[in-house]
Amino acid sequence: MTMDIHIENLPRTIELVADEGGPVLRYVDQRLLPGELRMEQTRDWRTVVDAIKVLAVRGAPAIGLAGAAAMALWAAYDGKGLEAASEEIATARPTAVNLDWAVRRTLDEISSSEGRDVSERLFSLVKLMEAEDEAANRAIGENGAALLGAESRILTHCNAGSLAVVFYGTALGIVYAAAAQGKIERVYADETRPVGQGARLTVWELSRVGIPTTLICDNMAASLMAKGCVDAVVVGADRIARNGDTANKIGTYGLSVLAKEHGIPFYVAAPMSTVDNSLPDGSGIVIEQRAAAEVLPRAIEGVDVWNPAFDVTPARLISKIVTEKGAFSPEELAAQL
Ligand code: MRU
């Protein structure tokens, strides 16, 4: 039975718009969700860098777009110290390759412009990247939906939905495409400690679209699988090495081990821009360490906190990597490169 879903209830997460006097970046401040859906706007590239660092804008493709847009704002309103500005933007967060990739695209555009119309050219490039993002997500959605059976119960982690991209989503893009085909019974969303992207963002997004959703604590996934309630695990990615090793939100690796134990397929959904061709395997992926206060808001003397934001899932635990070009086993993905 097809499901009535309402993608149109989701905002565009991030968008560069032409305003009187120049470009303005509009974005959802994700720290305020699910309580408040607030669109911020800025003309200041440094504000965009801060928004990335504090997770107001988050999710690999969304921070990539934010990086490119920051470069367009730099070109429109600043224009000084290209090297330092681009470095500051590209390194706002280290793990998602999309940020560095997007800033490099703007640098290539600046080089080829030979100093002419730099601001207009970067504006057009960012608009092109926004359109490419949505098109890639919709293709990922179709390619992933084809892997799912009828009445699928999906477990997802973190937020790899529309809020993590310009529009539509990668892992949740697969859910949306499959739901439109009547293939989704329910999505289980991990809370995703310590920042709560699942509890705050994924369930908000799924409920707005109209997908039956159940929130679980991260430590409930094993029991849920053991009870036979999960048909597939679908997650996003921040950086995929050439051999398919995949960095994603901390806790993803654990889920892949559990999925293997229970014989459940484990799918990673990401655009090709998340594949880092320079890395032979996941050992070279830099894992962002975040503040202790995310885990322990009130410090306790003598207690240290370890807070890596991401982990690396070995390729051998991944059934398919679903991209806009198709769904590939890790070996097949390497052949695509
Ligand atoms: O720290 P975050 O919230 O930026 O982490 C996001 C994730 O790990 C997502 O799963 C990943 O970026 C893919 S988003 C399509």
Image (spheres, helix red, strand yellow):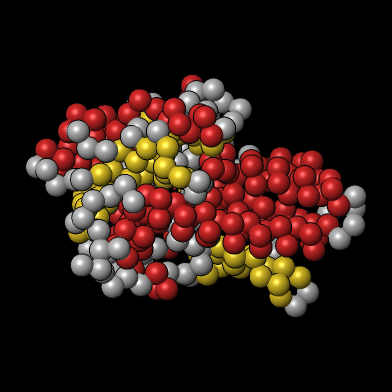
270 vs 68, nearest the viewer: 270
For residue 193, what is the image quadrant?
top left
Above-or-below relation of 312 to 268 = above
Relative to 160, is 121 on the left or the right? right
Residue 162, horizontal then vertical, whole percent: 44, 59
**What is the total number of numbered labels drawn onto the structure image?**
0
308 vs 126, nearest the viewer: 126
Assign the N terminus to one quadrant of the image.
Answer: bottom left
For residue 26, what is the image quadrant?
bottom right
For residue 231, what is the image quadrant?
top left
Point 37% across, 49% down: residue = 144
Kindly tell me whether residue 304 is visible in this rendering.
no
Point 81% across, 49% down: residue = 110
Kindly tell me whether residue 11 is visible in this rendering.
yes
Point 70% across, 64% down: residue = 43
102 vs 198, nearest the viewer: 102
Assign the C terminus to one quadrant of the image.
Answer: top right
Q: Residue furthest left?
A: 227
Residue 332, horizontal then vertical, whole percent: 45, 31
Residue 23, horizontal then vertical, whole percent: 72, 68
Relative to 228, is 125 on the left or the right? right
Residue 42, horizontal then vertical, whole percent: 65, 65
Q: Residue furthest bottom?
A: 20
Point 25% across, 55% down: residue = 187
Relative to 284, is 48 on the left or the right? right
